[in-house]
Amino acid sequence: MALQEKYKQLIDTAKTAGVSNLQVREQDGVLYIDGEAPSGAVKDQLWDVYGKIDPNFTGGDLILNVDAKAVEGSKVRVITQSSNLNIRKGPGTDQPIVGKAAHHEIITLLSKSNPQWWLVRTNEGEEGYSYAQYLEPVEG
Amino acid sequence: MKQKLVKALLLFAVIALISSIIPACKSKTSDSDIKTSTETALRGNPDLSGVRVDVNEGVATLSGEVKDEATRAAAESAVTTIKGVKSVTNNISIAPLPQAPVEVTADDPLRTSVNDAIKDHPGVTASVNDGVITLTGEIKRADLPTLMQKLNALKPKKIENQLTIK
């Protein structure tokens, strides 16, 4: 319970911001917070709160797995730091690059069957797998 | 002679009084009888095995834990209809849902995903052992949240961040 106290502000923010399927579990000295954020902004907000509690992320006592809810068939934005996003033939960095999407370009999400590597289609019609953490749902 | 008559009348009056009280006592169900019949009623439903009952002057107080609101209401209605129960105080609480254990990614797929995740952070080295990701090397402060977001999404058991922040 001590960890739930330490990260209380984070848990409360997740609840009030409407994170769905929210699960807060404590196991072997680590707190696990899982859920789906209604938007990329809510995910950012949660990470801001986490960063205030543990600025260097060195606690080793929290796994915050809350990603923005992205619906297959909807549009997603490329959120790399500044570079292009590689689109690969298969899910993995060992797979050949079949295309690229520009920083902040909006492309189409086709499938999330692999949680880390989403199948996407660029506006030029190229299809392939991109790293999910560099994609964010476009708020409607 | 008169005195005897008075005594006899008094005796008769006392007997009449006692005999009128005894059946009245019998018709009133005692607290322990209510408790027994309540417990019998609760035992009929296995969902109510966590419920305890106390009876005081016909007021039944229920306590303990049940799985949901419907079961809590069922316990109350099972007791309300028992003879002699004047009212029910329902102090039953609802047990928190048992949570599924945390899923941790197996080391081999986790190692592959971790290598994908750190690829864009050249100063960072990561090792994976029994679900625990240990980060060493160095990173710019601005890149740290991005890296942590990527790693937290991989369902590791724990992240030991030993990175030097530049």
Image (cartoon, coloured by chain):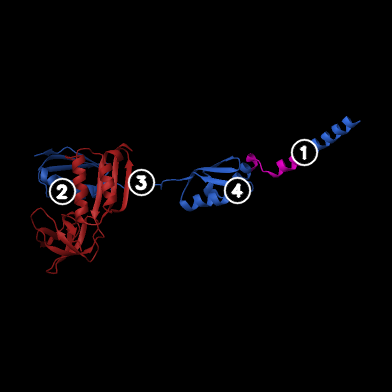
Distance from Cα at disc 2 to Cα at disc 4: 59 Å
Picture residue at 25% right of the left edge, 51% below the top:
A66
- At label 3, which amino acid type do we have? Pro
Q: Is residue A16 above or below residue B31?
A: below
| Residue designated by label 3 | B101
Of marks 4 and 1, the one in the foreground = 1
- At label 2, which amino acid type do we have? Thr
- At label 1, which amino acid type do we have? Leu
Query: Judging from the image, what is the letter of the chain drawn in red?
Result: A
Mark drawn on residue B30: none
Mark 3 or mark 2, which has the lower sequence index? 3
Q: Is B20 a magenta residue?
A: yes
Dominant secondary structure, magenta: helix
| Residue designated by label 4 | B41
Residue A133 percent location from the top left of the image: 18, 54
Task: Write down the region rendered in magenta.
Answer: B18-33
Q: Chain of mark 2?
A: B
Residue A89 seen in render: no
Mark 2 or mark 4, which has the lower sequence index? 4
Picture residue at 19% right of the left edge, 51% below the top:
A44
- Camera-side residue of B58 and B102: B58
| Residue designated by label 2 | B146
User: On the same chain: label 4 and label 1?
Assistant: yes
Q: Dot 4: few (<14), some (14–19), or many (≥20) neighbours within 10 Å?
A: some
Query: Judging from the image, what is the letter of the chain drawn in blue?
Result: B
- Camera-side residue of B9 and B15: B9
Distance from Cα at disc 1 to Cα at disc 3: 69 Å
Q: Quadrant of the C terminus of chain B?
A: top left
| Residue designated by label 1 | B17
User: On the same chain: label 3 and label 4?
Assistant: yes
